[in-house]
Image: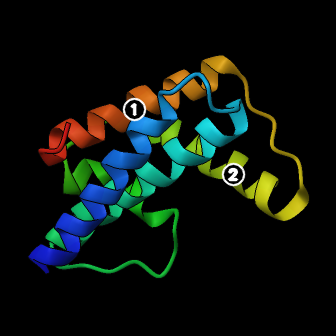
């Protein structure tokens, strides 16, 4: 379990770093930050010995896994919905503010998980 959590954190932190690079397209930055957030939240869930059958669950349980409140998990949940629209309907509607909020929320997850 420790190796799995470490691998998820390592991958997530690399993606988070790349998400902050303004040379990358806005869509790429969103994708990198979203996947970083998912990996970090998944690592927190796995650290507690659980597995999720649904991607969204890892965001919903943040108050329990990392003690993070709605100011973090609501941003991540919103981004999950936007990600799904882009993935399944081709409608990825993101802007600079959303990406900045996502990166900030992801940073809070990383810090709480001990990786930021």
Q: Is residue 113 left or right of residue 55?
A: left
Vertical order, 44 against 3 (above or below): above
Whichever of callouts 1 and 2 sits on the residue coming sooner in the sequence is 2
Q: Is residue 100 above or below residue 82?
A: above
For mark 1, give the secondary structure: helix
Residue 106 position, x and y percent, is 38, 38
Q: Which residue is mark 2?
A: 83
Question: 3 above or below 73?
Answer: below
Q: Is 46 situated left or right of 94 in this image?
A: left
Please, which residue is most extreme toward the top here? 97
Mark 1: give few (<14), some (14-19) or many (20+) Cα within 10 Å: many
Q: Residue at x 25, y 79 (%)?
A: 50
Residue at 43% from the left image edge and 50% from the top image edge: 36
Please identify the quarter of the rendering in which residue 98 is found: top right
Residue at point 26%, 48% (across, down): 63
Residue designated by label 1 = 105
Q: Is residue 15 left or right of residue 27?
A: left
The residue located at (10%, 74%) in the rendering is: 2
Question: What SS does tag 2 mark?
Answer: helix
The picture places residue 79, in percent across and down from the top left corner, at: 61, 43
Horizontal and vertical percent position of residue 24: 63, 32
Can residue 68 be spotted in the picture? Answer: no
Image quadrant occupied by the N terminus: bottom left
What's the distance in space between the residues labelled 1 and 2, CA to CA? 16 Å
């Amino acid at each position: 379990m420790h190796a799995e959590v470490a691998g998820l954190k390592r991958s997530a932190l690399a993606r988070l770093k790349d998400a902050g690079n303004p040379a990358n397209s806005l869509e790429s930055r969103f994708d990198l930050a979203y996947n970083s957030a998912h990996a970090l939240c998944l690592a927190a869930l796995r650290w507690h010995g659980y597995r999720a059958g649904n991607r969204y669950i890892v965001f919903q349980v943040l108050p329990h896994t990392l003690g993070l409140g709605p100011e973090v998990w609501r941003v991540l949940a919103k981004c999950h919905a936007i990600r799904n629209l882009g993935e399944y309907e081709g409608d990825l509607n993101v802007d600079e503010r959303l990406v900045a909020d996502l990166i900030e929320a992801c940073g809070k997850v990383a810090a709480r998980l001990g990786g930021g």
